[in-house]
Amino acid sequence: MSRELLAVTTLQRVARDRHALAIQAAIGWCLGGLGPVLILGARDLDVPRYQLAWLGSAFGFGLLGAGLLGRRVLGYGTEPVTRVGAVVVTVGVLLLGLGTNVPMLVAGGLLQGIGCAAFLIATPALIGIEDRAKRLALAVGVSSIAGLVAPGVIALADRPLSTGRVGLIVPGLWLVFVAFRRLHIVEGLGVDRPDAAAEPAGKMTSDTWRRWSVIVLAVSAEFCFWTWGAARLVDGGAAVDAASGLTAAFAIGMGVGRIIGPRSVGRFGPLPLSVIFCGGAAVVVMLDVSIPLLVAALTVAGLGIAVLYPVSLAHLLDDAALPESRLIALAAFASGVAITVTPTMLGILDRVIEIRYAFAVVPLCLVGAVALEQRSS
């Protein structure tokens, strides 16, 4: 490789990594606000929580669309995808922050999901192939850091303002800036090619399905905490505004785990630690314990499950049976399935049993992921 080409490639990688971190921060902010917006929205609109269970599922519907259209969308290039995603996310957070009825909040969740789906399918294209698992873990680590800041901002905004949901709008102006900012990267490599959608479709193998299913189970376990962690704190005796801020405990664990986790990715698989830490924390969440112990359990759960998604995503993307553009779309579809089904299922359970018992879904998902991972090559 010539010195000039090496310099261009290095600059491209730096630009892509920086942009991947930026859009992952936006995803983290939106995810971190889901639980607080659910309980604050139920309070502000004076409706039962289960009526807003669709917030998390609406987020998932956006990912389902990305999974179905991802290969074609990637054919337009990373820059247009992130620009459109930024505009759509901005409209979504405005509806979630200022909405005065349930349909407005659900529409905001749907638009937020569509925009974040665009970000999610753009991230692997930006990351590239080299050191994929470690770089993905670091990128989503930034997402977790943003996710831990969002609940605190929302909680602080709840007292002086009419509702803390307004705090979710914070990234809006920044996202509009991203929408009209050029990436200044060299196009034409990997999945970011104009002809990416024209690649051969390939054939799904049983191993591909197992790797895909591991992502579904990993994201399902994670979203139990993102969407319903705040509700569990409220049921445990925390005030609504306090619970909004305390949900940052899960994001703190996720952030720490995704920063230190990449060092251990190459030494041993993430599943054993996820089962021990996250599964054990879910059992504690199911018990009748104090608020401090619940907060500690949320932190440990985030730490335990931190690297499970980026590593399982990298595992799917390493599948040689399909072109990478299709694998990225499949990964988005897997997340969409998980996010659509799990919050809705827990919302239904919240109507018939205490929400703490619904967290039994977490260890079941982790055990299922372990069984599938052991069978995949």
Image: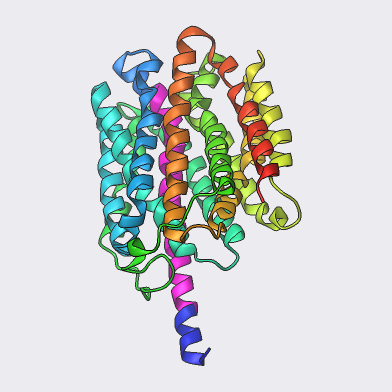
Can I make out residue 20 in this image? no
Residue pictured at 34% horizontal, 73% vertical = 184
Q: Residue furthest top?
A: 352
Residue 209 position within the rendered picture, expressed as x and y whole percent measured from the top left: 54, 44
Q: Which quadrant of the structure image shows residue 251?
A: top right
Q: Which quadrant of the structure image shows residue 309?
A: top right
Q: Which quadrant of the structure image shows residue 293?
A: top right
Can I make out residue 348 in this image? yes
Observer-nearest of 45 and 115 = 115
Q: Is residue 290 left or right of residue 112?
A: right
Residue 18 position within the rendered picture, expressed as x and y whole percent measured from the top left: 45, 64
Q: Is residue 58 left or right of residue 297?
A: left
Q: How many dots with numbers?
A: 0
- Majority SS type along the magenta span: helix
Observer-nearest of 85 and 370 = 370
Above or below residue 292? Residue 145 is below
Above or below residue 206? Residue 128 is below
Extent of the magenta region: 10-39
How are the colours assigned in the image?
A: rainbow
- Does residue 108 show up magenta in the picture? no
Residue pictured at 46% horizontal, 41% vertical = 335
Observer-nearest of 146 and 158 = 146
Residue 86 position within the rendered picture, expressed as x and y whole percent measured from the top left: 30, 52
Residue pictured at 35% horizontal, 17% vertical = 51
Residue 207 position within the rendered picture, expressed as x and y whole percent measured from the top left: 59, 48
- Does residue 16 show up magenta in the picture? yes
Observer-nearest of 263 and 320 = 320
